[in-house]
Amino acid sequence: MIMKNGMQKLELEFPKDVLEHAKESGISIEDFKKSLELFGTMQLVSETSKLSRSQLERLSKDIKVKAWAKMAKRLNIL
Amino acid sequence: MGQNGKKTEHIVIDANIVLSSLLRHEGYTQAVLSILLCSGDVKVIAPSGIIKEIERHLYEISRRSKLPFNVVRNSLKLILKCIKQVREEEFRDEILMSLPLVKHKEDAPLAGLAMKYSPSVVLTYNKKHFESEKLEKHGVRVFTPRELIEYLNLELKTSSRLKRRGGFLKIMSSLLIRKKLD
């Protein structure tokens, strides 16, 4: 089912006994659902990413260096 | 546990963890992050300047990863909305204090934010860029995702809610390890 906000609902089935056991053990099914959504998104996207570890580190450094330059100017640091 | 037996409630997240969770197929980081971001026990926070800069780099991230722009934008949005952004104005003094405790000045906002919310954790892949022992004196621990799993397990003794999440974390991690072995 496609939602108005551009999201699509994916129905997952779990054995009833497993979910009941989880609830009885105090596991929040809502937290579990949110974690699964996020984990699933990360897994699906990263499967097809072509970014290498070194490229990622360079990109991450570039982001932090630029953020630092703007912040240092704004806050008058150094 | 932080200093004085106070429980760690804030985790400061590095840009490399955010990007890695989406752009590298690294199960540990993804499992840790998906649980932390949906957990009410800890708050995942980051300097607002770094989050804004990630958003400004969306086209570059898309180009370099060869992922469609909309996929990058929408999935990063999902992650970033769970991270509390803190403006640098709120911890300017801590940024200045943390400058001698980091190897590269661009990491000072991460260390400074962690000091502001001490006892806290900095979650990063670049542990070597931080003076971990000195930061620990300020109630700040620096961990990689893998180390954070062990650290959370240590905290399980004092928190039953974390214990349940720790269980979930262990299950997800072991599933991923098994997948790798297969």
Image (spheres, rainbow, N blue to C red):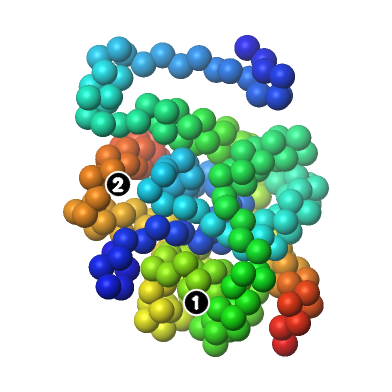
Q: Is residue B81 left or right of residue B72?
A: left
Which numbered dot is residue B107?
none
Q: Residue furthest front?
A: B90
Q: Residue at x 72, y 87 (%)?
A: A78
Which numbered dot is residue B130?
1
The quadrant in which the C terminus of chain B is found is top left
Q: Position of residue A8 (x, y in %)?
A: 63, 20
Q: Compared to A37, does B1 lie above or below?
A: below
Q: Position of residue A34 (x, y in %)?
A: 48, 32
Towards the viewer: B117 or B18: B117
**Disc 2 to disc 1, C-alpha distance:** 27 Å
Q: Residue at x 28, y 43 (%)?
A: B161
Amino acid carrying mark 2 in the image? Leu
Judging from the image, mark 1 belongs to the subunit labelled B
Q: Is residue A28 left or right of residue A57?
A: left
Q: Residue at x 26, y 56 (%)?
A: B155
Foreground label between 2 and 1:
2
Residue B123 visible, this orientation: no
The quadrant in which the N terminus of chain B is found is bottom left
Judging from the image, mark 2 belongs to the subunit labelled B
Which numbered dot is residue B162?
2
Number of on-image labels = 2
Amino acid carrying mark 1 in the image? Phe
Towards the viewer: B69 or B115: B115
Asked which secondary structure carries label 1, the reply is loop
Q: Position of residue B66 (x, y in %)?
A: 74, 42
Is the residue under label 1 in contact with that under label 2 (CB below 8 Å)?
Answer: no
Q: Compared to A65, does A29 lie above or below?
A: above
